[in-house]
Amino acid sequence: MIEREFTLHKAQLYRLLILISDNHLLSGNISFKGGTCAKLLGYLDRLSVDLDFDLTGNTEKKVLRKELYGIFKKLGLKIKDESSHALQFFLKYEAPPQKRNTLKLEILDKKFIHNKYEPKYLADIDRIINCQTINTLFANKLVALVERYENTGNIAGRDVYDIHHFFMKGYGYNPELIEERRNTTISIYMEQLKHFIRNHITQRIIEQDINMLLSYSVFRRIRKTLKQETLFFLEEEIRRMI
């Protein structure tokens, strides 16, 4: 997806995010995370197409679901599919033929005590939203690559790109969160992650998943070295822990 083709989708994301942030019940119970959050905060330079949140309040999901229904109706978004037990929705909007017309919204209700949040100003929508801290975003991204495969059998090349990008930017990560999520030490998990990338990430996975999320110049520059450089960063982290 090149940038100009993403404009309509981005407008739909922003409209939905604005109404969610303006809804006091929703904004008081959920916190922004994931690729779109990182992109809007300036931590990532790639396109992101979904809205992901953590459920951080105590309001019942059925109450929040009702609020979301009202927002979907107001925006003219049709529910293409939704989970009956989780707050996960696939929403359809009007778009030209053969163009992307669906976005995903998910509010994860699994809580981790080491997830950290802070209010952040998102200039693109002129709103302050409670977001995962960069250390939390990075830690969760380090886990996401392996857990996505364990839970669904899928591998996302964008997870590798994000790990690489965060290392390149010198961001820190929360090791306690990784240990909580993986129930092992940070050094053992980093070894596991290194072996996973070495054995499972192929050039085809990298090119198919990230070529539509990056500008051509960035994609061309990184595609051949992404895997090896990411392994280098992980090896350096493991060496630092010894």
Image: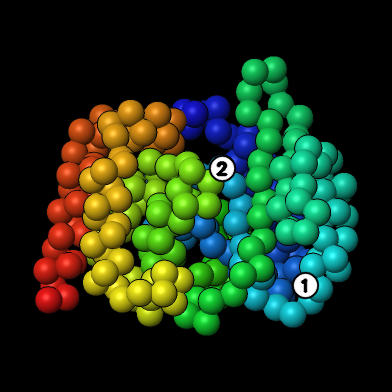
The answer to whether any part of residue 171 appears in the image is no
The residue under the point 11% across, 69% down is 239
Q: Earlier in the sequence, mark 1 or mark 2?
A: 1
- In the drawing, does residue 233 fall left or right of residue 124? left
The residue under the point 26% across, 64% down is 190
Amino acid type indicated by mark 2: Val
Amino acid type indicated by mark 1: His
Q: Which quadrant: the C terminus?
A: bottom left
Snapshot quadrant of residue 107: bottom right
User: Which residue, given by chain and number where applicable, does mark 1 sit on?
Assistant: 24
Q: x and y percent of residue 19 in the render?
A: 75, 58
- In the drawing, does residue 223 fall left or right of residue 20? left
Q: Is residue 53 above or below residue 93?
A: below
User: Which residue, given by chain and number where applicable, does mark 2 sit on?
Assistant: 49
Q: Nearer the viewer, residue 56 or 4?
A: 56
Secondary structure under tag 1 reads helix
Secondary structure under tag 2 reads loop
Snapshot quadrant of residue 236: bottom left
Q: Is residue 75 above or below residue 85?
A: above
The answer to whether any part of residue 79 appears in the image is yes
Q: x and y percent of residue 176 in the render?
A: 38, 79
